[in-house]
Amino acid sequence: MRVFTAALATETNTFSPIAIDKRAFEASLYARPGEHPATPTLCTAPITVGREVCAREGWTLIEGSASWADPAGLVARATFEELRDEILDQLRAAMPVDAVVLGLHGAMVAQGYDDPEGDLLSRVRDIVGPDVLVCAELDPHSHLTARRVAAANFFVVFKEFPHIDFVDRARDLWSIAVRALKGEIKPVMSVFDCRMIDVFPTSKQPMRGFVDKLYALEKSEPGLLSLSVIHGFMAGDVPELGTKIIAVTDNNPGKGAAFAETLGRELFDMRGTFMVKQVDEKVAVDAALAAPKGPVVIADVWDNPGGGTAGDATVILAELIARGVTDVAVGTVWDPIAVQICMAAGEGAEIPLRFGAKSAPHTGDPIDKLVTVRRLVRNAEMRFGESFAPFGDAVWISFDGIDVILNSTRAQSFDPSLFSVMGIEPTSRKILLIKSTNHFYDSFSKIAAEIVYCSAGKPYPNTPATTPYRKARRTIWPMVENPWA
């Protein structure tokens, strides 16, 4: 067997002012054929798992390029077309192949392309023809379009949010592909539109129980190969925005459709109950100060670079400063210019510095302080499950009993190693202020005395009922109360 694999991924917040070009991919991951490291990134696990599988089976794995950019705004048209065409040219050169196994995110939007992944998959199908297996792993915060479904044999989607299972789901993807290539099964995909958009953290009920049910059904139900929830990505203004269920069966589309609809309507009935309670910055600081011990993690949930925002909002930090709170560590505030200034000043320097709140309205005001530059780290990385997430050149500054990490590559706060790699022991601080919606939970919950979810400012379009969409359909909940009417 000859199998082609490649990856092209980012998550696009169409409301974000931060444009994406080739440099953004190079800053996060751009690996030419054979250059992908042994450790996978969030959307490239099909490549690293594929190496193991094909070595075991004695098959030939032809690797194409792998590209990942941290979430932001629209991808430049020329950048998408260059990266897409690079993979397509590699596929043409690899022909004939028996299968194409891709790592995608599913929420990319490029200038002139509402559905880049659908465009890529359709072109892949045109190259390989109707009989070659085409499949991909997707992030649940994606858009499942009719064009993608028509082009692929099947998708497997991360089940967990936080996405701690991206390697496990890549193994599921390859397991189904191997069985299909050996003629043991014929995977077919059924999709149900839940007619809603919501946020579904699996770190709490009711989504925890729902996902556990999916795992149980996959194990117990004959002929049911995979169940997935496409959560949707509410910051992506695209025509097919929304939550959907995917059921992959062994050549039984009727059974798959029935399972997908039953589960989809069950999910719809729980709409609006999934997210944890969020408080404003004043209540968040009150709660942290009242806690008997630390560290108390304040999660700035909507200034989340993982959702395409800048990660430079200062609303919560300003509240802490105004109230004279100390014993605080902040990770991170994105400000490449401030990082450059600190790098030039050097460790131990005391300098006046303005940082933060440069990217967009409703993110607070820049902070002006006399700061001490404590530590400089080039090409800093933190852990994220089995992978590493870069946050660029980074600086630890301190002032008035508060430590702040400034970073040059946007990244959400995945793991406490964000602090320790900079020389800050996170468990020694009373308050940790981080920027993430839910990916932080798996690791930070292990050290946190308490977690406070804070909705501060308006860096992210987090209320679909009032978000000024121009392309997204308005026939789903919560845009309408009853989309089934």
Image (cartoon, rainbow, N blue to C red):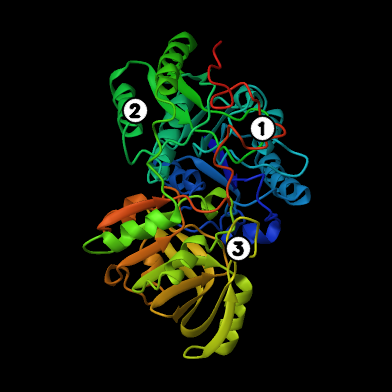
Please provide percent x and percent y for residue 279: 41, 48
Residue 57 appears in the rendering? no
Picture coordinates of residue 364, whole percent (x, y): 57, 61
Who comes first in sequence, dot 3 or dot 2?
3
Q: Tell me the residue at 46%/36% (across/down).
A: 199
Does the residue at mark 1 contact the one at mark 2 (Cβ under 8 Å)? no
At x 62% / y 52%, what residue is drawn? Answer: 72
- Pointer 1 or 2: first along the chain: 1
State left or right for residue 205 relative to residue 363: left
* Residue behind mark 3: 27
Q: CA distance from mark 1 to mark 2?
A: 28 Å
Spatial distance from mark 3 to mark 1, Cα to Cα?
25 Å
Quadrant that contains the C terminus = top right
Which residue type does callout 3 highlight? Answer: Ala
Question: Residue under circle 1?
Answer: 118
The answer for how far apart the CA atoms under marks 3 and 2 are is 36 Å
The quadrant where residue 356 appears: bottom right
Disc ID at residue 210? 2
Residue sitting nearer the eye, 399 or 84: 399
Q: In the picture shown, does residue 474 fall above or below 258?
A: below
* Residue 457 percent coordinates (x, y): 54, 53
* Along the line of sight, the residue nearer the viewer: 24 or 150: 24
User: Looking at the image, which residue is at 66% across and 37% down?
Assistant: 237
